[in-house]
Image (spheres, helix red, strand yellow):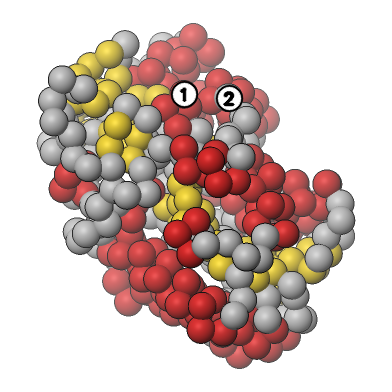
Amino acid sequence: MKILITGICGFVGSALARSLAQAGGHDLVGLDNFIRPGSETNRAELNELGVQIFHGDIRSASDLEAIPAVDWVIDAAANPSVLAGVDGKTSSRQLIEHNLAGTVNMLEFCKTHRAGFTLLSTSRVYSIQPLADLPVEIHRGAFRPDMSQSLAPGISAKGAAETFSTQSPVSLYGATKIASESLALEYGASFDFPVFINRCGVMAGAGQFGRPDQGIFAFWINSHLNKRPLKYIGFDGMGHQVRDCLHPRDLISLLEKQFAAREVPQEHRIVNVSGGATSAMSLRQITAWCDEQFGPHLIETEPVPRQFDIPWMVLDSTKAESVWNWTATTPVLHILKEIAAHARQHPDWLDRSAPF
């Protein structure tokens, strides 16, 4: 199968390309605009693995004219920050062009070549207000849902299921992903090509570009190791807020099943994919782990939450397990150790991959 991966030199795209290339059986093509600091570092290794990489931008339909016909597209190109468009660093128009107009161009590409399409979506499609209002309790240094209280529909101790509300507000970033999901399903139904949407938890692993609004696990470990300033922001200011995590290579087994599946009910085409509650950690827990690995580091405190902050975000992947027999296989501690090993080998990583 010939597969095109957009955003191939980003963290997720490059991790998927490495895993697929090493497994064999596929001809890989990649597209990247290289505007992300650090993305250029992945090009040489992918070339050595036989991946053909095109320099282009999914926002420009003419850039796709040089791409050969493929059997499948994995869309991993996006601005992945929930603060994008509102943080003063990226305009709202740029965000929409990247995450929505770019998706339209890739769907048109799939329509032309009759290629399958997988959209890597996000947990941030879920409504902010009920998540911000979630009743929580502190357990072992981390928030968790207070099961003695009434929880919003679609939330359980396992996390947010696909039935949880996606009603606005979800952030501009989340809105672009919801719109992309809807358009992708409509294109697939209208033009008869397979479409799958995988809503991913926080991606994490070695080589991730560490920024607090995107790669929080990599950012925190690299910053702690190099004794850079860190701060618990929002809620009680004690770092109890929780996220789950997922190594990109754990997606491969799911992607392979989706490549081979054609007749799938529409209701099964959207699934959550994440390490779930067993992979979830609070910033306080990550700090404790880092203290053991690197020695203690003082964390500053700012109790006032930022826009879009939520105390607990864990995805329930029960549907993916039921429909696809898929579960994440890389334990969270293995992910942390992998990031730490990379951080030790690359002490300048934050400067190289997130200079602003």
| Residue labelled with disc 1 | 278
Q: Quadrant of residue 72?
A: bottom right
For disc 2, the neighbor class at 10 Å (few under 14, some 14 to 19, many from 20) is some
Amino acid type, callout 2: Pro
Q: Quadrant of residue 81?
A: bottom left
**Secondary structure state at the residue bearing disc 2:** loop
Residue 144 left/right relative to 29: left
- Residue at 58% of width from left, 28% of height from top? 335
Residue 218 left/right relative to 45: left
Q: Residue 216: x, y in percent? A: 42, 38
| Residue labelled with disc 2 | 331
The answer to whether the residues at label 2 and label 1 have Cβ atoms under 8 Å apart is yes
For disc 1, the neighbor class at 10 Å (few under 14, some 14 to 19, many from 20) is some
On residue 31, which mark appears?
none
Amino acid type, callout 1: Thr
**Secondary structure state at the residue bearing disc 1:** helix
- Residue at 32% of width from left, 49% of height from top? 163
Question: Nearer the N terminus, badge 2 or badge 1?
Answer: 1
Q: CA distance from mark 2 to mark 1?
A: 8 Å
Q: Quadrant of residue 298?
A: top left
- Residue at 64% of width from left, 48% of height from top? 254
Q: Residue 310: x, y in percent? A: 23, 40
Q: Residue 140: x, y in percent? A: 31, 11
Name the one closer to the observer, 201 or 85.
Answer: 201
Q: Can residue 255 be seen in this snapshot?
A: yes
Q: Can residue 207 be seen in this snapshot?
A: no
Picture layout, residue 57 above or below residue 65: above
Residue 179 left/right relative to 37: left
Q: Residue 233: x, y in percent? A: 23, 33
